[in-house]
Image (spheres, grey):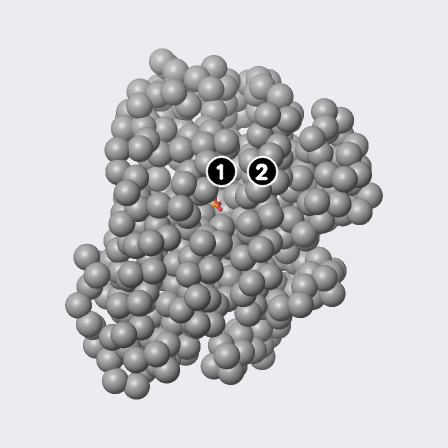
Amino acid sequence: EGGAAVPGHSGRARHVLLFPLPYQGHINPMLRLAGVLHARGFAVTVFHTHFNAPDAARHPEHRFVAVPDGMSGRPPPVSVDDVVKHIHALNGACEAAFRDRLAAVLAEYSRDAVTCFVADAHLLRMVEVARRLTVPTLVLRTGSAACFAGFLAYPLLCDKGYLPSSQLDMAVSELPPYRVRDLMHIGRDGHELMCELVARAVAAVKLSSGLILNTFDALEAPELAKLRRDLAVPVFDIGPLHKFSPAADGSLLHQDRSCLEWLDTQVPESVLYVSFGSLACMGARELVETAWGIAGSGVPFLWVVRPGLVGGRAPDEAAARLLPEGFEAATRRRGVVVAWAPQEEVLRHRAVGGFWTHNGWNSTTESLGEGVPMLCRPNFGDQMGNARYVEHVWKAGFEVAGGELERATVEAAIRRLMTESDGGEMRARARELKKAAAECTGKASSSEMAIVKMVTHMLSL
Ligand code: UDP
């Protein structure tokens, strides 16, 4: 704990201090940001909770400082209300300990050597602590620019009666192409909770000296322009971050690399990769319908059945035990099921021709960055909004179906994406976006310029 001084962390090196929110979808972009800063000569210190602590041994180039969260024994969140409550609880539980750890680090490095602190947008309390200790602070928001524009508009949208509402298909004319269902929401009961979460993220950004977004110009130019108009702090669109730091592995689960060898044996663009990220859950019946839909489609597949994917089952239950009897025999030569995959490499693999995803923002940008079209099955949070953009703005995929999944719907959706002509058009669009992502991350590109501006800004604070 605390970590001894490591080479490069003493003397006159410039330091940046980071604190990710402890979920996979937030740790990955923060560690990728760490990689970007390290490559530009910064020494990086990563504060982290005991809950979902990153594996420091895989990142000897950074220093890791544990912040006791006093939450051991608390089960990991499963539902969206749980996640929101958990974020709130973490803020309160870490505040005092973070103040102590931060003060110790500042004393050790000498105040002037610390360039700034970058916190996840959901860690308002840590932003406040850093401010009180006069450390300049930036905020990393790990979702899309469109999603954050939704955060800024939230009070207005509530005033106008969009939320809470049961008219989920109503268009939100202030934020096209969103409908009410595409906004962050958790129904009437959770409305106050969601308002608070959003308001705190906005407060964190407004208190900070800059907003860092894992997005890029070719994807969200109008949304970024809008944020720049509406925010007093500078906005740095430095994504897709996985393109700048491909080796920044922040995986909390063991990645089963054997599936890459299996992919090597498959025909180019023939395989459907199926993964719903680190938090999304499905019911036992839906898992069965999904399995038979995949089997019935006849399409080769690589499916991540994560421990805990089926709500209510023990998180350590082996993936294979959740699948229906006969599924393995029916798909033996055609598919592989793993508990957790090296997703970036999978999406980069030439055999992969489609991604059935829950549309977490990382998965969405990783898929677009590799030119893989998507079958969208958003679950909660910002995922519905991301899926909406995939289908209606980028036209690189479509939503499987609303409501409970049925095997026939699954089968038809998979065939449409993988073998039918409009699936082919979506693949062509995804390829264009891959090219655009490459252009946004190359030499003198928009994202690289944004990184240069961000670093210059950090050093000016
Ligand atoms: N991921 C992975 N292996 C898997 C599934 C996901 O490494 O089998 C990674 C994925 O590359 C992404 C992150 O986990 O960076 C998930 O983040 P995302 O925002 O897509 O979803 P979340 O887990 O936050 O819902």
Instruction: Give the residue at mark 2.
Output: 194
In the image, what residue occupies the spot 61% across and 40% down?
A: 195
Instruction: Give the residue at mark 1.
Output: 84
Q: Earlier in the sequence, mark 2 or mark 1?
A: 1
**Image height check: is 14 above or below 309?**
below
Residue 145, percent from left and from top: 63, 56
In the image, what residue occupies the spot 54% across and 25% down?
A: 297
Mark 1 element type: helix
In the image, what residue occupies the spot 69% across and 45% down?
A: 154
In the image, what residue occupies the spot 38% across and 72% down?
A: 16
Q: Is residue 375 visible?
A: no
Q: Are marks 2 and 1 in contact (CB under 8 Å)?
A: yes
Q: Residue furthest bottom?
A: 12
Question: Does the residue tagged 1 have its C-beta within 8 Å of any atom of ligand 1?
Answer: no
Q: Quadrant of ligand 1?
A: top left
Report the Cα–Cα distance between label 2 and label 1. Answer: 7 Å
What residue type is disc 2 on? Met
Q: Residues within 10 Å of mark 1 (few under 14, many from 20)?
A: some
Residue 90, percent from left and from top: 39, 44
What residue type is disc 1 on? Val
Residue in the foreground of this view, choosing between 319 and 178: 178
